[in-house]
Amino acid sequence: MKKFAERIAMLLLVIAIVGSGSFGGVATVNAEGETSANEAEALVVPNQMYEYDCGGGTACVGVLIADPEGITDVTFYVWGAANEQDDIIAVAGTKIAENQYEARVDATAHMTGGMLYHAYATRNGVSEILGMASATMENANMTQIAQTLTSPTGTIVLVDKSQNIFGIYSYDGTQYNYVRGNYCTTGAGGCTPTGTYSIGRKGYAFGTADYTCYYYSGFIGGKYLFHSVLYYPGTFKIKSGKLGRYLSHGCIRLDIDDAKFLQDYVLSGSTVYIYK
């Protein structure tokens, strides 16, 4: 993992130096983790990274390779942007066509703060990076709905129960812009209410003898809250971490980092709009 992180840092530096753009391109890496001497030439090869929603909280990530000759396999490294690769996974790509590889990943586990994904190939026995890209949870329909709302603080939280996603938007004087979003878990049987509310009281933690939840922000008194997924009492060991589901008693469960971000960023009095 350390070597992988060092390799990525080195390649990002090379990209900054040659000015060939943030994503796409090829740079070979030898057995010692050192990039090839012709990085500037290699990095402009137009490989195309892509991502789309496969449904059910699953993301499909892929790459279209400009020059597939000699490539025997492709691996995708995927992680959430929030916490420095603490959730990084490696997923073997499936060959879709001669120049195309694709993999399915659990987006609900790797979308905190957005999702980053890199593609590495083995070409003639040598490891090679094909490209780097990122994805967010911005939803076009949700962004349109945000423009129809107002908030006294200039910040809005929207929740789409039909997809179990949420989005935070901030007003720039002209329009509401997407700030952050992710999958969430809403009430079993649809018991999370729809409508317009506002952020109220906040706190660090609450729970029972069976679980603890962190970073709560109420939107209907103390009955309905945004809060983290469930942890074993008094710990940070996840007891129930499923997102993108209908499981709660009406509260809206978030990844713990999203719950803290919402609590810190979204002021009390901000508009909350829940729809389906």
Image: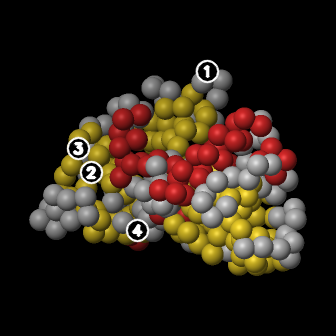
Front disc: 4 or 1: 4
SS label for mark 1: loop
Quadrant containing the C terminus in the rendered view: bottom right
How busy is the neighbourhood of tag 3: few (under 14 within 10 Å), some, or many (20 plus)?
few
Disc 3 residue type (three-letter): Tyr
Whichever of labels 3 and 2 marks the residue nearer the N terminus, that label is 3
Q: Is residue 209 above or below residue 26?
A: below
Front disc: 1 or 2: 2
How busy is the neighbourhood of tag 1: few (under 14 within 10 Å), some, or many (20 plus)?
few
Q: Residue at x 32, y 69 (%)?
A: 240
Q: Name the residue under label 4.
A: 242
Residue 104: image location, x then y, percent: 62, 72
- CA gap between label 1 and label 2 equals 33 Å
Whichever of labels 4 and 1 marks the residue nearer the N terminus, that label is 1
Q: Mark 2 points at which residue?
A: 214
SS label for mark 2: strand
- CA gap between label 3 and label 1 equals 32 Å
- CA gap between label 3 and label 2 equals 6 Å
Judge whether residue 170 can be spotted in this image.
yes
Whichever of labels 1 and 2 marks the residue nearer the N terminus, that label is 1
3 and 1 marks in contact (CB < 8 Å): no
Q: In this view, does 208 lie above or below 5?
A: below
Q: Residue at x 64, y 29 (%)?
A: 175
Q: Name the residue under label 1.
A: 173
Whichever of labels 4 and 2 marks the residue nearer the N terminus, that label is 2
3 and 2 marks in contact (CB < 8 Å): yes
Residue 40: image location, x then y, percent: 80, 44
- CA gap between label 3 and label 4 equals 21 Å
- CA gap between label 4 and label 2 equals 15 Å
Q: Residue at x 55, y 38 (%)?
A: 179
Q: Residue at x 63, y 64 (%)?
A: 31
